[in-house]
Image: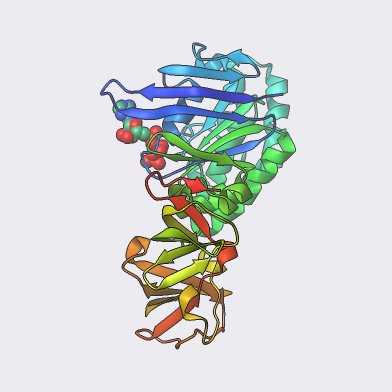
């Protein structure tokens, strides 16, 4: 059993940097929780407070119901894996993995069995006699993971552990880490700025922005019901299209309006200033579609990525100055398929997300 509870966790550094602002979340027993957000949003600081490497300014850190704020790192029963592996270069793989057990004065025979078991689990048992420099990046990362696993802590803390690996190895290690975590039934907090890692690995995702927790939920909750424009834009690639406009009522229906665009909503909404959000893959391509619920613009970028192609049109009113549709490979656009042509996308009312203009928060 290991449940990690962060209650209103705050961090102010001595220079008055307010790095973490009242973060509350729970990682249930055996859950894989990913902390994700842009650089500087406070992910690492949060993780380091859980590890005991950073003092907690206020709030509570509970592990299995016990307040841990003032416990030494070694008494929290957590293991942390860093981005740079931090293996001892002069020790063999075996010695590196055995180190935490040796420090805890575990008997030699037991150390041998535990290290060998974990090495087999990670597929590095044939490297035990080698030094870290004789290993590839992925193998070294496995040793670092092994060193964390070997003493069976209650909680694993991972800080961007895959960011030094190449793309193919990252994908492989993502799946592997997830499998290992499931097999061990371990509770894990995992920091990354990579949204794909967050979506593919997390049972739950905590999206952070400027020290605050913007949203905490399952990957599908966060993707399908982003709580704010920030979350909507952060997860998903290409990012969700965002267009400012307003809501009006006409003959008992609600409409989103902006310039010539007028899209009927599938649900009533309050009148006011809003942002419309629409995922690129929710755009519909239709020849000769009705002018009012369609958006047109000059095609300025075409990105074929295999099964789909991303088409960007120029729209000064949209976030980032572009509006993008992701369509299955081989579909023709309404208007043409070449750069510089004016093309039209239809926006289906039922796929629209709405956000308050002032706060950026979702309107349900
Ligand atoms: P990254 O992905 O770049 O590692 P992060 O989300 O992990 O970013 P943190 O490292 O937690 O962000 O930093 C959060 C904020 O706290 C930043 O503004 C950073 O400058 C500040 N900060 C971090 N460590 C310290 C420190 N030791 N002293 C003062 N300010 C700090």
Image location of residue 292, percent across then percent down: 47, 76
Q: Residue furthest front?
A: 251
Q: Is residue 171 above or below residue 285?
A: above
Q: Left or right: where does residue 285 sit relative to residue 317?
A: right
Query: 360 or 322, which is in the foreground?
Result: 360
Residue 192, relative to residue 265: is it above or below?
above
Residue 76: % across, % down? 57, 17
Residue at image point 50% right, 68% down? 263
Which quadrant does the N terminus fall into? Answer: top right
In this view, 253 is above or below 39: below
Q: Quadrant of residue 216?
A: top right
Quadrant of ligand 1 in image = top left
Q: Where does residue 253 sit, x and y in percent of width and height? A: 56, 62
Horizontal arrangement in the rendering, residue 178 relative to residue 198 (left or right): right
**Numbered disc total:** 0
Q: Eyeballing the image, is 36 above or below 113?
A: below
Give percent across and percent down for residue 119. 67, 38
Horizontal side of residue 298 vs 141, given as left or right: left
Please state if 53 lies on the left or on the right of 2 as rendered. Answer: left
């Amino acid at each position: 059993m290991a449940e990690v509870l962060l209650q209103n966790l705050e961090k102010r550094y001595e220079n008055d940097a307010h790095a973490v602002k009242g973060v509350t979340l729970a990682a249930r027993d055996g859950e894989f929780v990913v902390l994700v957000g842009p650089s500087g949003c406070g992910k690492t600081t949060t993780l380091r407070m859980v590890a005991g490497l950073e003092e907690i300014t206020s709030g509570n850190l509970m592990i299995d119901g016990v307040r841990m704020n003032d416990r030494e790192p070694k008494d929290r029963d957590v293991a942390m894996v860093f981005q740079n592996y931090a293996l001892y270069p002069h020790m063999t793989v075996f010695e590196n993995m055995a180190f935490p057990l040796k420090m805890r004065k575990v008997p030699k025979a037991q150390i041998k069995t535990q290290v060998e078991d974990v090495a087999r689990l990670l597929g590095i048992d044939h490297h035990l006699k080698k030094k870290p420099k004789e290993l590839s990046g992925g193998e070294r990362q496995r040793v670092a993971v092994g060193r964390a696993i070997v003493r069976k802590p209650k909680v694993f803390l991972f800080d961007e552990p895959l960011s030094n690996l190449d793309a193919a190895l990252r994908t492989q290690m993502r799946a592997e880490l997830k499998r290992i975590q499931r097999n061990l039934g371990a509770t894990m907090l995992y920091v990354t700025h990579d949204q794909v890692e967050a979506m593919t690995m997390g049972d739950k995702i905590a999206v952070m922005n400027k020290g605050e927790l913007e949203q905490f939920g399952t990957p599908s909750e966060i993707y399908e019901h982003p709580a704010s424009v920030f979350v909507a834009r952060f997860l998903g690639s290409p990012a969700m299209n965002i267009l400012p406009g307003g809501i009006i009522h006409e003959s008992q229906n609600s409409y989103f309006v902006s310039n010539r665009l007028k899209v009927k909503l599938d649900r009533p909404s309050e009148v006011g200033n809003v942002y419309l959000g629409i995922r690129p893959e929710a755009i519909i391509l239709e020849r000769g579609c009705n002018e009012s619920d369609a958006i047109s613009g000059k095609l300025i970028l075409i990105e074929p990525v295999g099964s789909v192609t991303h088409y960007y049109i120029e729209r000064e009113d949209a976030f980032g100055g572009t509006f993008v549709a992701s369509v299955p490979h081989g579909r023709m656009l309404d208007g043409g398929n070449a750069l510089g042509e004016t093309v039209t996308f239809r926006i289906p009312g039922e796929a629209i997300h709405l956000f308050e203009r002032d706060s950026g928060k979702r309107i349900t």
